[in-house]
Structures are given as C-alpha cells and as structure tokens.
Image: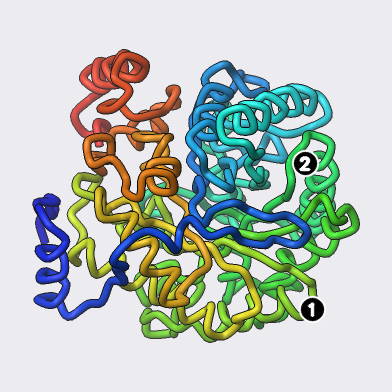
Amino acid sequence: MKHEKFHYRTLEDVKAKCQELGVELPFAKDTKALAQSLKLGSFTIPNRVGIAPMEGADSTEDGRPSNYTERRYTNEAIGGSGIIWYEAISLAEEGRSSKTQLLMNEHTLDDFKRMNERVKEAGLKANGFEPFLVMQSNHSGRYSNPGNRPAPMIAQRNSWLESFRPADDSCIVSDDYLKRMEESFGDSARLAKMAGFDAVDIKSCHGYLFQEVIAAYDRPGEYGGCYENRSKLLKNSIRAAKQYEDDKFLVTARIGIYDGYPAECRGFGQAPDGSMDLTEPKRLVRELHDELGIGFIDITMGNPYATTHVTRPFDAGKYPPDEHPFEGLSRMIHGIGEVKAACPEMIIYGSAPTYLREFSDLYAAGAVEQGLCDGLLFGRMSFADPDFANEIVKNGRIDPKRVCLTCGKCGDLIRAHKPTGCVIRDSSTFMPFYREFMDEKKSLPANFRG
C-alpha cells in the first residue's frame, strides 16, 4: 500500500472509509465525556485528556533538562492537560537512547525538581490546577545509543529486528544485569518522588529492554521461556518501586500489548503464527492490578523503530505500511478495549489518537463513552498544539487549524538528536533544526540517507 494521505473533510467521510474497510472507530457526538474528572488513587484528574510520552531530544549531554525541555512541558501544563506523562527518562548511562535523552540520577535530580515546580506552577496559574506528572523510567535496551553510537543491550537474538540494527550474542544482557535493573527501577521511584513527580512509570513497551524480556520466549535462565519468568523483571521492578508509594505518590506502567512482528520473530501479544493474541497481556494487566495493586496504566502497541504504523499510524514515514491507517487505529483502540474489559477495575489510558486530526477529539470521547478506555493520551498532537486540551474542554472542540498533520518531521528531529517539536506549527523554533538535519542528510552517502 502507498502512504495514505489524510483527505477527509467531514466525519461522515471518515466513517464511510471505515465502513469500506470493514473497521470500527468510536466517535461521539460531542466531547463532554473528556471534560469529566477521573480519580487516580487520592488524586482527582480534572479531565480525560493528557500528554503521551514524546522524547524531545533536548537534554544536556549529562542528561539534565534544558530550556527546551522546560519550555515544552510548561506549554503543555498551560494547555490544560490533566495528566502529563513525561518522555522516556533513562536510569543508566549505558541505557540512554542518545546523548540528548534525559537521564535521572542523584546529579540531575535537582534540575528535574526545579523544572517540575515551574511546570506545576504554570498549570495552576493558567488553569487553576496542577497537572498530574508521571515520570517514565526506561532502559533503551536494543536501542541503546549512548554518545550517539549504537551499543545494543538485548534480551535475545531477533533476526528481523537485527536487519534494521545489528546485534550479536555479545549484546545479550546477563541475568545478573537484569536483577540489578530491578533495583535501579525500584530506586527510580525514590528519585521521581523527590523530584516532585506524582507517579513513576515502570515502562514495558516499544521494543525497549523490559518489552524484549517479556517477549523472550527463547531466552534460557530465570528471565526467559515461560510467562512467569518473562514477566519477572517488570513485576519485581514494580514491587521494588511500590515501597515508595503513598497517598501522594503512585506507581504505574506503560504496557505494550502487541508488538506486530513477523511470525518467525514473534513478539509479545502474538500467537506463534504472528497473529495478535492478547491472552498474556490481559493476564499481565489483571495481575498488575490484583497482585501488585497497580490502579492505572497506559496501553500502547508496536515498536516505533520497526513497526511504526502499529504504534502511531502516519501519512509519511520510513516505509509504506501494508494496511490503511484506520485499520491500525481500530486495532489499537479495540485491543485496549479488550484489555479494559478483562480488568474493568483498572483505570486505563489509551494511545495514538492524533492521526485523526480535527476528529481526534470526537474519537477520544467516543472511546471513553464506549468504555474502551478511561482517557486518551495525545503524543504528536502535543507538539503541534499544546493547547489542545483547553480547546476541547473549554471550547468543546479542538482547533482544526492547529492539529498535527502526521508528517513525520518531529520523528526526523528525534532520530537526528536535535531539539524536537512541530516543524509546521512552531516553525520559528524548530525549522532551523530541521534545516540542519536536511543539510546533514545531503552530505551523507546515498545509502545512509534513509
């Protein structure tokens, strides 16, 4: 299939295309459902829309937030989102995705604390409430790139993924290393709490280390093979983090429920033939709730490095997907709904509404109304229009002149390790970085331009 260009002028056009494709997307008549409050433990979140984790590639070389980082999160707080789920923050230098990825440790802690104070103050002043801030703890695993030089750390070999980014047996991490990660991710809760976050996310999605381990069907030892072994890293890390939980600080997770890999390189949430099978993801979410006391999570799918169309349907990207973007959206929201139905007590945020542009708000409201999820996190949209939440909640609809166009340019900036935002809607800030990227790309040999 060629890249699908979004050309739908009315919601009826979107619905007609869905009918032609034989897929269902939830749409509400209005956005009132998104203006409802939501309880997360002792916290009350004032609306059902939030910011999804989006790396900004704008840290200092030692991992501290920069002026660009603070600008981004402050603008999102002013924009009225009830919850801001921060981007992936590395806990180990060797696990950073680049030298411009945020890094949390004792040395950078005070910088995060100062930034969070300003972010909350900005939200309170603009909207009368402080946004709920989640720190996403991560180890990039296969995609570790400290110093902007690939240094993969993998759970097991995967020939298909290695066709995109080479790795060999020497890259496989030991059981001892994974045990140390349990301690590190547990300690991330302490650091997050001290930095003024309201929750910490023990991240397991998008092909990073924890997601690889939970899909390590062929790995020997105590972290591979059976489900109990594969889920141990995530569960033990959450248990370690829970010791810091109280009525003012929560532990959560972002869970990838379907990787979308070929059958011969089976990912999580897939049957041996490669088809989507949510038996284990539903079991995992149920256990996180019942056994570990996790009250809310965010659910996503895919691997942005390899199955980007599964993670976030797009107009333009590195490859033409073999499905229409509406098919990917339908898989995402109904997969989330299947997990929600299996654990209705869990507060579940959904992902990836941005592709629908000016109809994404009615889609999000419909998903909440139909019980497929309890709220929606917007990623690329927050780059293009950080005020989208106030537009929805206060004005009733998102501003169609400010929506994300899913052009992929923000992704280009992230991969180029440059400060990232919307090149179209905030061109005065980010177009210079994009021009730098294009100039650098022209200087590369043709086979390296991508």
Kindly check if marks 1 and 2 are in contact, taking CB atoms under 8 A apart as contact: no
Q: Is residue 356 above or below residue 258?
A: above
Mark 1, other Cα within 10 Å: few <14 / some 14–19 / many ≥20 = few
Tell me which residue sits at (53%, 78%) in the image.
Answer: 340
Q: Secondary structure at mark 1?
A: loop
Tell me which residue sits at (49%, 76%) in the image.
Answer: 269
The quarter of the displayed image where residue 64 is located: top right
Q: Is residue 421 above or below residue 285?
A: above
Using the image as rendered, state which of residue 363 and residue 150 is in the foreground.
363
Using the image as rendered, state which of residue 145 and residue 338 is in the foreground.
338
Q: Secondary structure at mark 2?
A: helix
Horizontally, is 389 left or right of 132 in the view? left
Horizontally, is 414 left or right of 138 in the view? left
- Of pointers 1 and 2, the one earlier in the residue sequence: 2
Using the image as rendered, state which of residue 431 and residue 73 is in the foreground.
73
Res 63 seen here:
no
Q: Amino acid at mark 1?
A: Glu
* Residue on which disc 1 sits: 291
Q: Can you give x and y, in whole percent of width and height, for residue 89 in the image?
A: 64, 39
Tell me which residue sits at (45%, 71%) in the image.
Answer: 258
Residue 192: image tag: 2
Query: Which residue is outermost to the right?
Result: 243
Tell me which residue sits at (84%, 60%) in the image.
Answer: 242
Name the quarter where the N terminus is drawn. bottom left
Q: Is residue 119 above or below residue 66?
A: below
Q: Can you give x and y, in whole percent of width and height, for residue 201 in the image?
A: 67, 53
Residue 255: image tag: none
